[in-house]
Image (spheres, grey):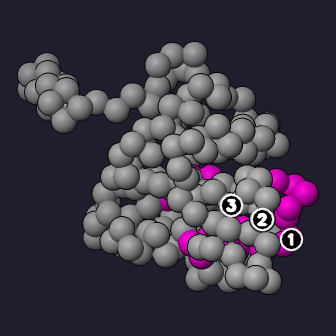
Amino acid sequence: MKPTPTQKFEVRLLQTEEIDAAVDLLGRQLSEHGVKTNLGKVRSVIERIVDDDRLGFVMLALAKDERPVGVALGCAFLGIEHGGTSGWIEELYVLPEFRQRGIGSLLIAEFIRVASALGWRAIDLENETGHQRAASLYERHGFTQLDRSRLSRRLVESGGESGRVHSARHSSDLKSSYLRRHR
């Protein structure tokens, strides 16, 4: 979305040469939330999404001077609740000094537009408990609060190999091996 003459920001799909900027912004977000992670793994996820749009997409918000000031990362999934491919706003972040200027709203609006164009059936997200300002922003864009809580279980310790996508052949081999052992 190109800025209008009165608008100071542009939101667009991340380009390969902008991956460093997205890694930096997401690293800042995770640090703000006290999440320790390896930025190399963040980069790997972003590179894979940029290389294969079936996995999702990444949006970048830029100031008029082309400075990256915000990012949104979405991951696709196939599910029965929404009846097909849907997505998850995995991360949405705006630099603190650029908040309260409508950038988050621009990111969400463009995210919804791209997700719709990709044929996603719905978009899910999580919001930290008590983060009412963010909840209000999402609600202004049509998101509704669900009567659920989210749980998580780590399958690989943070030092190990995680997030590795297997090829279809490899996944098929894994399933076959599992079924042979558990019959």
Q: Name the residue rendered at 37%, 52% in the picture.
A: 53
Pointer 1 with pointer 3, Cβ within 8 A:
no
Q: Where residue 173 sits in the image (x, y, percent)? A: 14, 25
- Give the labeled residue for mark 1: 100
Residue 21 to residue 140: above or below: above
Q: What range is drawn magenta here?
A: 88-110
Q: Nearer the viewer, mark 1 or mark 3?
A: 3
Quarter of the figure that contains the N terminus: bottom right
- Give the labeled residue for mark 3: 61
Of the pair 156 and 108, the residue shown nearer to us: 108
- Residue type at mark 1 is Gln
Q: Quadrant of residue 117?
A: bottom left
Q: Quadrant of residue 71?
A: bottom right
Marking on residue 64 = 2
Residue 164 to residue 3: above or below: above
Pointer 2 with pointer 1, Cβ within 8 A:
no
Q: Where residue 65 sits in the image (x, y, percent)? A: 79, 59
Q: Where residue 131 sits in the image (x, y, percent)? A: 79, 63
How far is the residue under mark 2 from the one under mark 1?
17 Å
Q: Name the residue rendered at 48%, 38% in the picture.
A: 47
Residue 139 to residue 52: above or below: below
Crowd tier of the residue under label 3, counting other residues whose Cα lies within 10 Å: few below 14, some 14–19, many 20 or above:
many
Q: Nearer the viewer, mark 2 or mark 3?
A: 2
How far is the residue under mark 2 from the one under mark 3?
10 Å
Of the pair 108 and 14, the residue shown nearer to us: 14
